[in-house]
Amino acid sequence: MIILASASQARMRLLADAGLEVAAEASRIDEAQIKSEQALLSFERLAIFLAQAKARDVSQRHPGKLVLGADQLLDCEGKLYDKPKDGQAAASQLRTLRGKKHRLISAAALVKDGAVLWHHVEEAVLRMRDVSDDFISSYLEREGDLALQSVGAYRLEGLGAQLFETVKGDHFTIQGLPLLALLRELRNRGELPA
């Protein structure tokens, strides 16, 4: 059994679909404060730092258990974007991303008893179509609150696929978890059959 240090339904679904027995508990870390304090880190190092911080936090409450922390950052032209707070913020973010490339940086960390056992980071590069304001409005109306659950205000595995011209990178990484690297590490540790 692995404990996911997150309330992310997408990550829970990825792990469950891969056959893992998982429980979830959201971490209590202040991500905004960490991002502010660690502003000099590269985006890749920041994603790892956040994944480790989440897992360490939850690990404190579960001695002897393997805890998985994960984080995803969106970088467009050197600026980080967070999950939009509402539909207006989602529309603004999509208008900013349209016609441009952006990176999704997904990190994962395994922690047991507060000690980091493993971490990994991967990125995917996506180019959004130069969509119209009307398309963005229609898309957000159809997606509803689901658009607010993703750092990019889209779900590539759903209606969000219509937003993109090109996608380079692992599908799992785009969904917020470098799953194949995680599964390999779990096999190496004897947590999964080889």
Image (tube, rainbow, N blue to C red):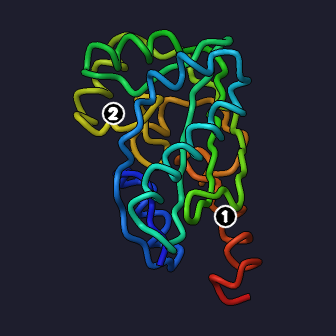
Q: Is residue 194 above or below residue 129?
A: below
Mark 2 lies on a secondary structure that is: helix
Q: Position of residue 146 (x, y in %)?
A: 29, 39
Amino acid type, mark 1: Leu
Q: Earlier in the sequence, mark 1 or mark 2?
A: 2
Q: Give the alpha-carbon distance from disc 1 to disc 2, as whole Å.
A: 26 Å
Mark 1 lies on a secondary structure that is: helix
Q: Is residue 167 above or below residue 61?
A: above
Q: Is residue 149 above or below residue 163?
A: below
Q: In the shown orientation, is residue 132 left or right of residue 56?
A: left
Q: Is there CB contact under 8 Å for labels 1 and 2?
A: no
Q: Residues within 10 Å of mark 2 (few under 14, many from 20)?
A: many
* Foreground disc of the pair 1, 2: 1
Residue at 52% across, 48% down: 175
Amino acid type, mark 2: Ala
According to the image, label 2 marks what residue?
Answer: 147
Q: Position of residue 20 (x, y in %)?
A: 50, 77
Q: In the shown orientation, is residue 47 left or right of residue 15?
A: right
Q: Nearer the viewer, residue 60 or 137?
A: 60
Q: Position of residue 89 (x, y in %)?
A: 32, 14
Residue at 44% across, 37% down: 160
Q: Position of residue 147 (x, y in %)?
A: 33, 33
Q: Which labelled disc corresponds to residue 182?
A: 1
Q: Residues within 10 Å of mark 1 (few under 14, many from 20)?
A: some
Q: Nearer the viewer, residue 136 or 61?
A: 61
Residue at 37% across, 69% down: 23
Residue at 71% across, 45% down: 121
